[in-house]
Image: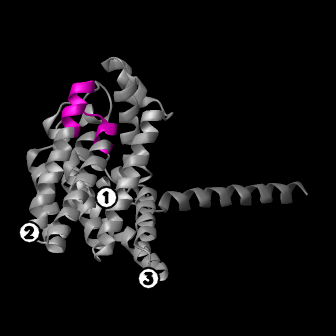
Amino acid sequence: MNNDHNQTGMNLQNLDDDQVDAKQREPQTEPEAPATGMLGDFWRALALLSRVPVFISCDFSPQAMARSVWCWPLVGLFMAGIAIIPAYVIEILTGNVMVAAIVATFTLILLTGAMHEDGIADCADGFGGGFNRQRKLDIMRDSRIGTYGVVALVLCLAMRIAVLGAAGESGSMAAILIVMATLSRAAMPIVTYVFDPAREDGLSKGAGRPDIRMVSAGIAIALVLVVIVAGALTTFMCLIAMVVGASVVGWIARHQIGGHTGDVLGMTQIVSELCVGIAFIAILQIS
């Protein structure tokens, strides 16, 4: 009995040793290298500006995020392309462009996680409710929404739906979605380049100013896309509208809190998007 027990114990020990040796012989899996180059910039931009899952390993350091600003209009194109699909289906089913505009707006909000809407609501509450710079910044970091934020959200959403509906009446909803999404995301890097960060901490401060070449590349990409879908005259007018919207937001932010924050960039996207949309509709009316 003792011999059998000892033999069994030796066999178990040998089995354990064999398993250890087998594990040691197995190839060790190394961590996946972060995506680099232009493709890496796009995945970083997509992760920053949307809720779309990104399963590729990327370098999300502040400096790398700042380098990806040239891709931001491409992310806008990507999300506009997705929003067009359900809006088009709803328009076919209902024959109502306003319902399609609401669906497109809802889809964009889902894709971004209401990131930009949150930004303009926080800015409205902070700029309207704070009595000094630090109090404004504190209110902007508060997750609760106030009266100013609600009013700003309602007005901006109503304006977006109205603009999309007006374009839909002339069969241009897909075009205006692309124009608004790309140019408004080219506007945000302009604000980060021209104005200083308002806080001493946070992503904006850590990343610093983006390279002017990256900012210029983003604007150029957006302009090429807009020319393709809307023509040269519409591109020119929408560019002016985008610059005006971004400049107004940047000037207000500098006056109110001394510079830009993540919320200010969200406000930049919304305001410049609406300015671009209004310019687009104006060109439709005179052409």
Residue, disc 2: 232
Corner quadrant of residue 161: bottom left
Check if residue 254 falls in the magenta segment: yes
Residue at the (35%, 34%) spot, across then down: 123
Q: Secondary structure at mark 1?
A: helix
Check if residue 218 falls in the magenta segment: no
Is 147 or 109 nearer to us in this picture? 147
State which tag comes first along the sequence, 3 or 1: 1
Identify whether 94 is placed above or below 47. Answer: below
**Quadrant where the C terminus is found in the figure:** bottom left
Residue at the (19%, 69%) spot, across then down: 284
Q: Amino acid at mark 3?
A: Ile
Q: How is the image coloured?
A: one colour
Residue at the (44%, 82%) spot, across then down: 92
Residue, disc 3: 92
Residue, disc 1: 43
Q: Amino acid at mark 1?
A: Trp
Identify whether 68 is placed above or below 26. Answer: above
Q: Position of residue 106 (x, y in %)?
A: 45, 60
Given this view, does label 3 or label 1 mark the residue nearer the observer?
A: 3
Q: Amino acid at mark 2?
A: Ala
Q: Secondary structure at mark 3?
A: helix
Tell me: 202 left or right of 91. left
State which tag comes first along the sequence, 2 or 3: 3
Range shown magenta? 249-266
Labels 3 and 1 touching (C-beta < 8 A): no
Corner quadrant of residue 281: bottom left
Identify whether 201 is placed above or below 277. Answer: above
Residue at the (46%, 29%) spot, across then down: 142
Given this view, does label 1 or label 2 mark the residue nearer the observer?
A: 2
